[in-house]
């Protein structure tokens, strides 16, 4: 009998329009999500959601901006569906690939319920960095689901941060899109994290700092050693928020300021800490870059729906399915 396997790609999720209510809901869910590990009182979450919803509505309308993140995640799911059912074990397994999100519909828990009758469910964390709010949240969902469902619990697919195959995809991606000139610099940008809470203490939850540092170091070294490399230097920076305490350094703005003081004229920025472009990597990061005194900067797109990334995901999923079936 052919097995039915649900592969659920789970991204953070972003509002897709300028609608106040859509942006309010997205921010409210995001802050509730973060409030599980940070000290974010509910009244503060509500006020921030209202203010953020209004701000996004005004900003998105003025700049004619729409986040592509959810659309890209759906495209990634569509690509993966085609590759799995056409190339990987097409006669033994029927793969059904879904896109789901932590803070926007369709929510991951709803898709897990919808696919509960499948022989196997895979929750693919669409973030290269493991922490309590990405793969950790999926693992908690899997644990809770196992307590109320007699069938096999969903399997979380993660550990992308130390995957040599993904590193190679990133290398090829950078050298395909990057156009280096003499004196150029590459910045590898990650989603930042807390390093100290509001009391000056190290956070008690899994922040992913170690994973970011190790991924950044490995990718930086691989880029510098690659014979295709033409960058004078490769730097690491973080796209931070301003809640909960002290965040990772240097921020993108701080990194650009330091590079400008060193006379760097041409800077490429690659947000390797994300699998898809969104508001942080497009709107906010470009605003910081535009405000800097760096003479010339250019953004290399996230890995998004590239063919190489789809091939990598298909191989990753196939390997997990083989391991679960053995």
Image (spheres, grey):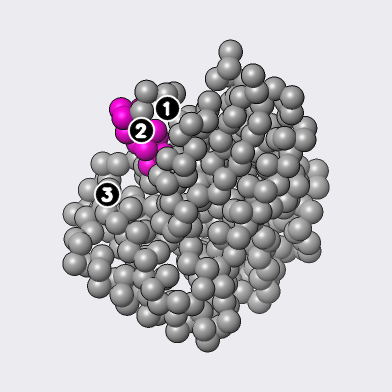
Q: Is residue 256 left or right of residue 172?
A: left
Tell which circle, 3 or 1, labels the residue nearer the N-terminal end. 3
Q: Is residue 139 magenta?
A: yes
Tell which circle, 2 or 1, labels the residue nearer the N-terminal end. 2
Q: Is residue 284 visible?
A: yes
Q: Is residue 54 magenta?
A: no
Q: Which residue is mark 3?
A: 36
Q: Which residue is mark 2?
A: 145
Separation (CA) of disc 3 from disc 2: 19 Å
- Which mark is in front, 3 or 1? 1
Q: Position of residue 165 (x, y in %)?
A: 68, 34
Q: Residue at x 74, y 28 (%)?
A: 90
Which range of residues does the magenta coloring cover?
136-148
In the image, residue 101 above or below residue 68: above
Q: Are marks 2 and 1 in contact (CB under 8 Å)?
A: yes
Tell which circle, 3 or 2, labels the residue nearer the N-terminal end. 3
Q: Which residue is mark 1?
A: 153
Category of crowding for the residue at label 2, using alpha-carbon neighbours closer than 10 angstroms: few (below 14), some (14–19), many (at least 20)? some
Q: Position of residue 42 (x, y in %)?
A: 20, 62
């Amino acid at each position: 009998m052919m097995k039915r396997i649900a592969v659920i790609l789970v991204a953070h999720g972003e509002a897709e329009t300028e609608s106040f209510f859509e942006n309010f809901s997205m921010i409210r869910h995001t802050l509730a999500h973060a409030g599980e590990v940070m000290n974010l009182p509910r009244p503060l979450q509500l006020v921030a959601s209202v203010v953020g919803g209004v701000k996004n509505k005004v900003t998105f309308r003025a700049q004619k901006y729409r986040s592509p993140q959810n659309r890209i995640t759906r495209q990634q799911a569509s690509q993966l569906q085609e590759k799995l059912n056409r190339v990987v074990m097409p006669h033994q397994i029927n793969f059904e690939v879904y896109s789901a999100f932590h803070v926007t519909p369709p929510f991951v828990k709803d898709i897990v319920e919808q696919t509960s009758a499948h022989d196997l469910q895979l929750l693919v964390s669409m973030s290269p960095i493991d922490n309590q709010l990405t793969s950790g949240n999926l693992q908690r969902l899997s644990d809770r689901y196992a307590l109320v469902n007699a069938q096999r619990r969903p399997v979380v697919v993660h550990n992308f941060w130390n995957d040599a195959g993904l590193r190679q995809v990133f290398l090829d991606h950078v050298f395909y899109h990057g156009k280096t000139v003499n004196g150029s610099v590459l910045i590898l940008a990650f989603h930042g994290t807390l390093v100290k809470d509001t009391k000056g203490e190290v956070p008690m939850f899994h922040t992913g700092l170690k994973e970011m540092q190790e991924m950044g170091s490995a990718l930086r070294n691989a880029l510098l050693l690659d014979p295709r490399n033409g960058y004078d230097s490769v730097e690491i920076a973080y796209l931070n928020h301003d809640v909960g305490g002290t965040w990772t350094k240097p921020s993108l703005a701080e990194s650009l300021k330091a590079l400008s003081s060193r006379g760097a004229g041409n800077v490429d920025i690659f947000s390797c800490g994300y699998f898809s472009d969104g508001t942080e990597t497009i709107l906010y990061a470009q605003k910081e870059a535009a405000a800097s005194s760096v003479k010339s900067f250019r953004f290399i797109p996230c890995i998004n729906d590239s063919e190489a990334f789809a091939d990598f995901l298909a191989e990753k999923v196939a390997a997990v399915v083989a391991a679960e079936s053995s």
